[in-house]
Every structure is written in C-alpha cells, then in structure tokens.
Amino acid sequence: MEIIKLSTDWAKAEVFSAKMVGLLTLVVFLTALGFWQLGKTPMAKSFVWPLFVAGLLLVAVSAGLYLANKPRIAQFETACKNDAAAFIQSEIARTAKSKHDLALVFKVLPSIIIVAALLIMFSQTPLWRAIGVTTILLMTLLMLIDSNTDARNTVYHQKLLTAKQ
C-alpha cells in the first residue's frame, strides 16, 4: 500500500512543520520577554505587546497545523483500506483546494507586508513602528511556513494524480 505510506509521510511532515512553528513561537515569546526585561528605550519597550500578540497568533497556527494533521495519520490507513479509489479522489480534491488557498495566501501576505512597511515609514510613534516591524516578521514567518506547505502539497498532489492512473 504505497498510497498509505505517501499520505502518512505527508501528514507526518505537516506535524513536524507544526512543531517547528512551535519552536519559532517560543523564540518570539522569549524575544518579547527579553524586550520586557532588558528594554531601556521607548522603542525597545514598545515591542513587548506586538511580539506577544504575534506569539499568540503563531500558537494558533502551530495548533491548527498539528490538530488538523495528527489525526489524519491514523485516518488515512482506515480510509484507504475501506475504499482506495475514493480516498485518492478525496485527497486530490483536498490538495487542489489547498493549492488554491495557498495561492491566495501568497497574494495577501505580501500586501500586508507592504502596508506594515508604510506604517513604519509614516508613523512617528514607537508602538506603531514596533507593530509594523512585528507584522513584517510575522508575515515573513507565515510565508516561510506556507512555502514549505505549498511545496509538500504540490508534490503530494502530483503523486496522488499519478497513483489515480
């Protein structure tokens, strides 16, 4: 059952990605803590809350990736054994939808980065500049995560199309 191995390997890679996002989240929280404890300037102190909020958003991303994909590992084997053709077809449809969603993400995230850069350029207050910098950091991390997800999804989708034939 090569299709089961292919599917479970894909889901395991997504779970690993969720764990890496969790590590990045820890770094963001530690950075916020560092600014809170060691920040002496108004600019340094203004990074605490934006980084904390970014950390919470990364927790949501990590949890979403993990909780969506961890159960799939066991579900794939059952679904494939019950009806392999239907399983392959449903996975092809799901990965095609993911490809469409990721294409939209790669249009929205750069737009948010541009707005955040403008915020940095035209804002005079340290808090708004910190929000702009943190937003750029967060959107860049999300694009990094989603670019890996997109690459895995594309390869998985192509292999599913090949297995269908």
Image (cartoon, rainbow, N blue to C red):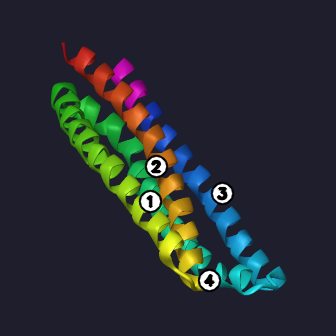
User: Contact, CB < 8 Å: mark 3 with mark 1?
Assistant: no
> In this picture, is 153 found above or below 104?
above
| SS label for mark 1 | helix
Q: Earlier in the sequence, mark 4 or mark 2?
A: 4
Q: Earlier in the sequence, mark 1 or mark 2?
A: 1
Quarter-of-image position of residue 165: top left
Task: Indicate which label's residue lies in the foreground, 1 or 2.
Answer: 1
Q: CA distance from mark 3 to mark 1?
A: 23 Å
Q: Earlier in the sequence, mark 3 or mark 2?
A: 3
Crowd band around label 1 with a 10 angstrom C-alpha radius: few (<14), some (14–19), many (20+): some
Q: What amino acid is labelled 1 in the image?
A: Ile
Q: Which residue is mark 2?
A: 143
> Where residue 108 sits: x, y (%)?
32, 56
Region rendered in magenta? 1-7
Q: CA distance from mark 3 to mark 2?
A: 16 Å
> Where residue 129 sits: x, y (%)?
57, 76
Q: Is residue 92 magenta?
A: no
Q: Which residue is mark 4?
A: 126
Q: What amino acid is labelled 3 in the image?
A: Leu
Q: Which residue is mark 1?
A: 113
Q: CA distance from mark 4 to mark 3?
A: 27 Å
User: Contact, CB < 8 Å: mark 3 with mark 2?
Assistant: no
Crowd band around label 4 with a 10 angstrom C-alpha radius: few (<14), some (14–19), many (20+): some
Q: Nearer the viewer, residue 2 or 43?
A: 43
Q: Earlier in the sequence, mark 4 or mark 3?
A: 3
Task: Indicate which label's residue lies in the foreground, 3 or 1.
Answer: 1
Q: Residue at x 67, y 72 (%)?
A: 29
> Where residue 117 sits: x, y (%)?
49, 64
